[in-house]
Image (tube, grey):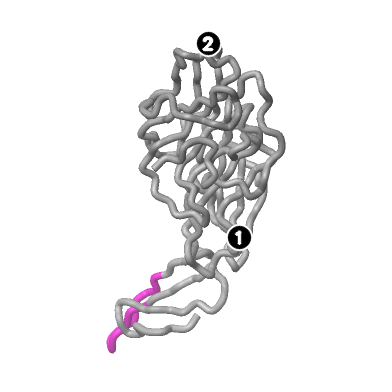
Amino acid sequence: GTILAGQGTSTISVNWETCGPYDISVQSYNSCATSQPLSMTLPASSIHDNMGLCLISVDSTSQYNIIVWEKPLTSAIDSFIVYREVTQGVYNRIGALPYSDESRFNDYNSDPNVTSHRYRISVLDTCGNETLKSPFHNSIHLQHLGNGNLSWSHYAIEGQQNPVDFYRVYRDDNSTGNFLPISTTVPGGNNSYTDVNFSSYPNASYLVDVAWGLSCDPSRAITTTRSNRYVGQFPVGMGHSAGDTHAMHPYPKPA
């Protein structure tokens, strides 16, 4: 690299012209003596190792999971790499997107109607160095246990307390795509709800989403996460669209 400023002072500014890692050695000196060198190694990547995900959600047709992250303004990132847990604690790479793409990944090989999933993300910088994987996010999986009893897995972020303030439960009375809230205040520590009017809606579908205080700024405005849809006697919607977005809610969009 090239020293830009600070020679002879306690702070030195260096412009690195090649990819790292960088070994640095500093000595102090005066007219009488020169100290032993103090050495350190700067990491190969200037990108933060634990850049986190924004959220995991499910597309509007309940066909696949959506992984969303915030894209920092930098010229040092080549691409983002997405991982999904395959066995406990083991994550396989499932895809990558270049920095120039929208900061969301559609996992078409997932099935949110069967189980919840955990995901991590890493960053490949322009020097070819991959950062550590981020803390995982665990998606919501909704089940209908019969007689209007709903249960779901908690949304979870590794190393953090429960991020959910409360869950909102929606019912589509006739599975026609018209979801309306039947409860908007299920505390975030709870993961069950009973629809006492279930017998009046034998063909109903259900889903839940969350209200939380997470702050994130992905390429496309997706601010909440939702579960899969539990569908009564009708099949889940066929097919999917790569352009699916939470801006097109099948239920009233939260404020």
Front one among 79 and 182: 182
- Residue 215 on the magenta segment: no
Q: Alpha-carbon neighbours of circle 2 within 10 Å: few (<14), some, or many (≥20)?
A: few
Stretch in magenta? 27-38
Residue 199 numbered tag: 2
Q: Please indicate, yes or no, whether residue 211 appears anywhere in the rendered image.
A: yes
Residue 107: percent from left, percent from top: 65, 43
Instruction: Residue 131: give x, y in percent of width and height.
Output: 54, 56
Location of mark 1 (residue)? 101
Q: Quadrant of residue 201?
A: top right
What percent of the width, then of the height, locates residue 202?
58, 14
Q: Amino acid at mark 2?
A: Ser
Among the two numbered marks 2 and 1 on one chain, the one whose residue lies closer to the N terminus: 1
Q: Which is the main secondary structure of the residues drawn in magenta?
A: loop
Q: Residues within 10 Å of mark 1 (few under 14, many from 20)?
A: few
Q: Amino acid at mark 1?
A: Asp
For image coordinates 33% across by 77% down, the residue present is 11
